[in-house]
Amino acid sequence: MNGILKSHGGFMAFSFLLLAFYACTERELHGIRPLDTGISIRTSWGDIVHGDAETLEFHFYPADGSTPIVESAVPSGGFEGKLPVGKYKVLAFNSETANVETVDMDSYEKAAVIAKSVVTVRSGENMRLAEPGPVYAFRGEIEVVEGALSVYTVMADPLTQDIGMQVTNNTDLAIVSVRCDFPGIVLGRYLSRTRDKEPYHQESMGIYPAEAAFNNRIAEIGFRSFGVFSPAVSGLSETPIVLTLKLDDGRTIETEVAEFGKLLDEAVGDREFSAGLKLDIELKLAADGTGDIFVGIGIQGWKDYDGDGMPDKIGRNGKEILY
């Protein structure tokens, strides 16, 4: 959706989600009487429920490259105040969300929000990540005009998504919980780019330690992240996923799907998911001829995930593999 900016010289089209008008009449914003001159940036959340984002942090990047202006603890409805006359690029996000940190905030292009790492593994290439809270970004370009009130509206852009795994126990084993170190997690996102663009630090991947208990033979593993790398891009095709199963007698069984990355690539490829992802896994028993019992995993395929525990559309089917 293109926005339109009304200026003294005519109309100029912008490719970002932003609308601007000059010399607006007085309106109410956050219950505060508007300024006669200055800047008013209103946030539009669409159908996003953002009760977990009560305040925003705004960063204004002057066109002349001087030091950015930062406004913290701004109500989620938007910013209103005085800025020096001139043009700015703007970034805003809910900085108080859990388990995230910012990097390179002095640069509009490099500013990023990343998940905090619990521990670094594999010589610093992969991070074991904490689960981030939801992150919403706003971006655009504005101009402060002397003697006028400039009013803009910017749109919320969610940068995080939900990932879910439903594990079904179709064995005779009394399995009480399951744990997996989910590979290929995106470390973070650039605030100035939408989620379908290049992720932060594409050379490195994260790992998320997910765990859930079984209830009526089903375990729902769910967590939030900045996304999952496409195996074809990241080299994840050769990366296995390992499930650790805990039995009611205290024993543990560890099983690995060596071709997990290939299955993920077949199911996801370069697709972009509007909400999140869900993977169905089925545990089975298989004998190797020696009487030993193994846990098999049937990967049913990825599904678009609405974050409420139920898939809303079926994606491409994966394969079933027994180990």
Image (tube, rainbow, N blue to C red):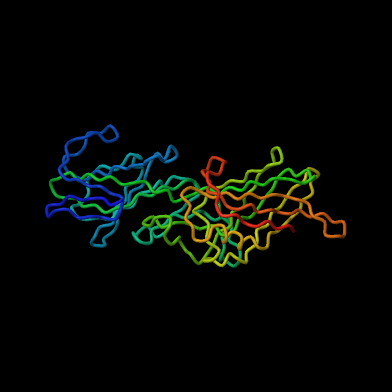
Name, please, the residue furthest toward the top: 31
Q: Position of residue 159 (x, y in %)?
A: 44, 51
- Looking at the rendering, which quadrant does residue 316 occupy? bottom right
In the foreground, 12 or 38: 12
Residue at image point 22% right, 49% down: 83
In the foreground, 22 or 69: 22
Give the vertical position of 40 relative to 61 (above or below). above
In the foreground, 12 or 222: 12
Give the vertical position of 219 relative to 300 (above or below). above
Q: Position of residue 202 (x, y in %)?
A: 48, 64
Report how many numbered discs are placed on residues in the image: 0
Q: Position of residue 69 (x, y in %)?
A: 29, 53
Q: Position of residue 19 (x, y in %)?
A: 25, 47
State the quadrant of the C terminus.
bottom right
Residue at image point 60% right, 65% down: 237
Residue 62 appears left or right of 293: left
In the foreground, 57 or 2: 2
Residue 284 appears left or right of 160: right
Residue at image point 33% right, 42% down: 44
Name, please, the residue furthest toward the right: 290
